[in-house]
Amino acid sequence: MKRLCIVLLTGLPLLASCSTPDIQSYRDNTPKLDLYQFFSGHTQAWGMFRDRNGKLIKRFSVDINSHRDGDALILDEHFLYADGTRQQRSWRLVPKGDGKWHGTAADVIGEAEGEVAGNALHWRYSLRLPVDGREWAVDFDDWMFLQDNYTMLNSAHMSKFGFGLGEVSLFFRKE
């Protein structure tokens, strides 16, 4: 019993460190994020992936063309990696009310779930990610923060089986 108590007590700080902020803590932040407005037309982004030790693994740029299809927001993303490889992803984002959004894409497993409050968007989803000729199911905990009407910052923590793999950082610029 004593060992169990020690394990539980030493594990609590680890569990607490895995929690994320409540999206509603950003509800009063401005400017207010309107996904339709920010992603209307053309947006550019630049980003990188760093592994869990902070080592830069990949750099990339993204051209995003967006339009509405009824209530849905379609984001057509074209990635160009520093090594010359290319990738394409098309998101279909659908509002569900009260700031909640659901998203789908061909390489997303199931449905992404997100919520907007104030200047922030918090997304959670699993993605089939090609790695060295294989495909991994990777979980994303994705936070986006609108800085002004033309600029948004994104930080996404990647994990598998609850273990951190690294972080994707993006800088979006609306034209």
Image: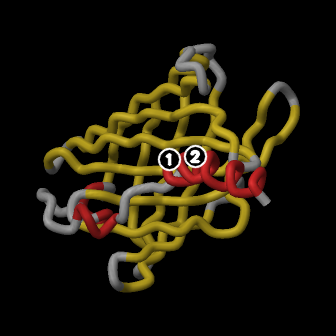
**Residue 94 place in picture, x, y as percent:** 47, 75
Q: Quadrant of the C terminus?
A: top left
Type of the residue with mark 1 = Ser
The residue located at (67%, 55%) in the rendering is 8
Q: In which quarter of the image is the N terminus?
A: bottom right
Could you say which disc has been placed on residue 134 in the image?
A: none
> Mark 1: few, some, or many residues within 10 Å (few <14, many ≥20)?
few
Could you say which disc has been placed on residue 17 in the image?
A: 1
Q: SS for tag 1?
A: helix
Q: SS for tag 2?
A: helix
- As displayed, is residue 92 above or below residue 55? below
- The answer to whether residue 63 is left or right of residue 120 is right
**Residue 16 place in picture, x, y as percent:** 50, 53
Residue farthest bottom in this picture: 97
- The answer to whether residue 154 is left or right of residue 32 is right
Residue farthest front in this picture: 2
- As displayed, is residue 34 above or below residue 99? above
- Report the front residue among 126 and 85: 126
The residue located at (49%, 55%) in the rendering is 19
- As displayed, is residue 28 above or below residue 65? below
Quarter-of-image position of residue 95:
bottom left
Answer whether labels 2 and 1 touch (C-beta < 8 Å). Answer: yes
Type of the residue with mark 2 = Leu
Quarter-of-image position of residue 63:
top left
The residue located at (40%, 69%) in the rendering is 115
Q: How far apart are marks 2 and 1 (CA)?
A: 5 Å
| Residue linked to disc 2 | 14
Residue farthest right in this picture: 134
